[in-house]
Image (cartoon, grey):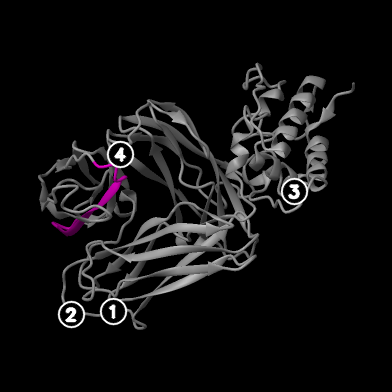
Amino acid sequence: MRKTSFLVLGVFTVGLLSGVGLSTIHAAIRGSAVFTDVPSTHYADAAIGEMYQLGVVKGKTATTFGPNEFITRADTTLLLKRLRDEIKGISSSVSSSRSSSSSSSSASSVSSSSSSSSSYNPGGVVRFSANEFTVEKNVATGKAVISIVRTGGNQGSATIDYVFGSGTAISGQDYDPISGTLSFANKETSKQVNITIKNNTSSSGNKTVQLKLKNPTGAFTLSTPNDIFLIIKDPNTSSSSSSSSSSSSAAAGGTIGFSALSYGVLEGATLTVTIQRTGTTTAAVSANYATSDGTGDSSDYSGVNGTVSFGAGETTKTITVATINNTSVDGNRTFNLTLSTPTGGAVLGTSPAVATINDDEIASSGSGSVKFSSATFDVTESQGKAKIIVNRVGALTAASVNFATANGSAISPSDYTATSGTLSFLAGETSKIFEVPVVSDSVSESQETVNLSLSSPVGAALLEPFTASLRIAD
């Protein structure tokens, strides 16, 4: 049998699927959003993305597909076996023995299990449209507009509950808490909720309101981010809102921020939280810290507050929060960590953060995994940079993972600045960010993409999605 192309097989599989009752499937991503060697103008772009999302075929590597390379009879048989299993909804025990690093091997591009296809849902996923929202306390309208979006599919109706409350802001004084249910009709992809912001005269620094989505029903499933903060900015304070520590490193006193976006601790143990100072360190600076209830309360942890002080040249400090053990199977609980009122010319970096108390009656152990918080991230040119979140799940020990960007339809350095490095998770840290600078220009152009990848984990395994796409809009 002559060797046949990946592209022919990719298009063939889409046609086959449409003939077996799966015509409602829509590609959540395109091949060009994942693989650097698949142009967005390619006729098989959508087919490659759809088969990748279903788990029928993967890339030759994490970032390359080899669209013009050939496959053998054995490779073709294996791909069709995976496709058959996907159609019948069963897991396959067949796996390739070929090395994924072999340039001539295409069998490595086949998913080792069809289980990844279960993550695809024609109804899509629902999440907040951003990793955080900000609003000035004296906003003229008295409202903060919160956007909730449905991505990756739009088939069928569905509902999602929302709860806006908790955090360091005071209910009734700084904002009016709200909760309710949003209903998405078939093919409806976005909703907005308004939260009332109080314009009081007190000058007490920036405040936070926790925003949560929960209890999805119907066609879609819940995705991340689904538990974030609204930052109510005090115009009378010089501190910045929740931003990456690198964004304010030019401040006279440097930047003070938490070492991670989120933390985890086993019930009954003590959580150690690192507070970092970056940028200028020649002067003495300080900031206040405090905990506040999330889904947990005083029966779950012992709240703390105080001041962390950095002397000249000092760059790290730690605080501890004790948690309380019980014998109930009551699930995980959260509390918030917040910094405020920096002194000495310093500004705030990463703040607030969320800590999760893991219920030890249902806790599991293991080396854990690292993954992107989402398969897609969005940024506009005017924002100047994209914040990319990487999560640690399943364990609380130290770990690290490398990250990198690569050209998709966006080209470095004209559209964005190429970025790579290593994210190091201390014990208890469960979420980190890195930033991708984007270029704002006067050229009117369509949406462009940057490919993101994780590799070489230490102390953890890679969990999908370990490749993602950053979408840049004008």
Q: Nearer the viewer, mark 3 or mark 4?
A: 3
**SS category of the residue bearing label 4:** strand
Q: Nearer the viewer, mark 3 or mark 1?
A: 3
- Pointer 2 or 4: first along the chain: 2
Give how far across and how far down residue 133 sits, in percent. Answer: 38, 64
Distance between the alpha carbons at the discs numbered 2 and 3: 58 Å
Q: Are marks 3 and 4 in contact (CB under 8 Å)?
A: no
Distance between the alpha carbons at the discs numbered 4 and 1: 35 Å
Q: Which mark is residue 22?
A: 3
Q: Nearer the viewer, mark 4 or mark 1?
A: 4
Question: Is 177 included in the stretch rendered in magenta?
Answer: no
Q: Give the magenta part as a residue range.
A: 328-346
Residue 247 in view, yes or no: yes
Image quadrant in which you'd find residue 294: bottom left
**SS category of the residue bearing label 1:** loop
Distance between the alpha carbons at the discs numbered 1 and 2: 9 Å
Distance between the alpha carbons at the discs numbered 2 and 4: 36 Å
Inspect the image, locate mark 4, and give the three-letter code of the amino acid beneath it.
Answer: Glu
User: As rendered, which of 390 and 88 lies closer to the eye?
Assistant: 88
Q: Nearer the viewer, mark 2 or mark 4?
A: 4
Reading the image, the residue beneath label 2 is 201
Give how far across and how far down residue 303 sits, in percent. Answer: 14, 51
Reading the image, the residue beneath label 4 is 429
Distance between the alpha carbons at the discs numbered 3 and 1: 51 Å
Inspect the image, locate mark 2, and give the three-letter code of the amino acid beneath it.
Answer: Thr
In the rendered image, the quadrant that contains the N terminus is top right
Give how far across and how far down residue 54 sits, in percent. Answer: 66, 41
Q: Are marks 3 and 1 in contact (CB under 8 Å)?
A: no
Reading the image, the residue beneath label 1 is 138
Inspect the image, locate mark 3, and give the three-letter code of the amino acid beneath it.
Answer: Leu
- Pointer 3 or 4: first along the chain: 3
